[in-house]
Image (spheres, rainbow, N blue to C red):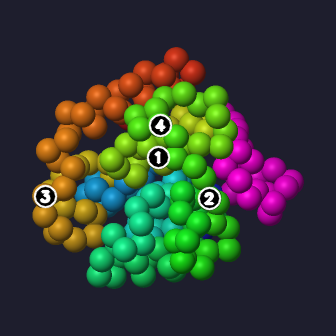
Amino acid sequence: MQPQFSLPDNHNKLATLASFKNVHQDETIIVCGCGESLNQFEQPERFITIGVNDIGRRFHPDYLVVVNPRNQFKGDRLHYLVNSQARYLFSQYGDLQIPHPQLIKFQLGTRGGTDFSNPAVLHYTQNSPYVALCLAIHMGAKRIGLIGIDFTDHHFFAKTGRHPLNRYLNNINEEYARLANVATEMGLKWLI
């Protein structure tokens, strides 16, 4: 069961990233990565959620962000993308070959970008949750919570070993800090 929230009257025609600008103005959105702390997220259906990759193993978010190419999802990870029940799936790939009825293609902006003046792009870094966080800001969220963005040794679904981006953690922290500063200046509140 997903939260009851209203989309604009033209919600069935939301076909571009720009059409999602401020669609959740002043609402709360929880951005979910695939880290171990996601297992502590109880009753996600109470919230508007943006998840990444194969989060569908745990629950189906309202919005799913996939910025990795299809061939990077090994084993059964692709199964959870193909069978996603997210309301909308966002990706920069038009040829993702995922039969989702609401695939929203967008352009990647600037690496580590924090400028939200162009409604047709989402900025990125080395990790998908950054893009999901930019989507939440683009959608006009007033309050954003983060969970599962751990960079610990395992994913929420298995003992997968050391996170491949762990060696870049200082850089990742700096990128998120810059984005958090800009978002706070925009009036966004962080849920801790």
Residue bearing the label numbered 2: 105
Tag in front: 3 or 2: 2
Please state the extent of the stretch shown in magenta in the rendering. 4-27
User: How would you classify the magenta stretch by its main secondary structure?
Assistant: loop
How far separated are the C-alphas under marks 3 and 2? 31 Å
Kindly identify the amino acid type of the residue bearing the numbered disc 4: Thr
Query: Of residues 15 and 1, which is closer to you in this image?
Result: 15
**In which image quadrant can residue 97 be found?**
bottom right
Q: Which residue is mark 3?
A: 162
Please give the name of the residue rendered at 50% of the width and 79% of the height, measured from the top-left corner: 82
| Residue 77 as seen in the image, left or right of residue 5 | left
Question: Residue 123's spot in the image, x, y percent?
Answer: 49, 40
Judging by the rendered image, the residue that carries numbered circle 1 is 131
Residues at marks 4 and 2, CA–CA distance in whole angstroms: 16 Å
Marker disc for residue 171: none
Please identify the quadrant where the N terminus is shown.
Answer: bottom right
Q: Check whether the beta carbons of the residues at disc 3 and disc 4 lie within 8 A of each other.
A: no
Residue 49's place in the image compared with 97, above or below, is above
How far is mark 3 from mark 1, CA to CA?
22 Å
- Residue of label 4: 110
Q: Amino acid at mark 2?
A: Lys
Q: Is residue 12 magenta?
A: yes
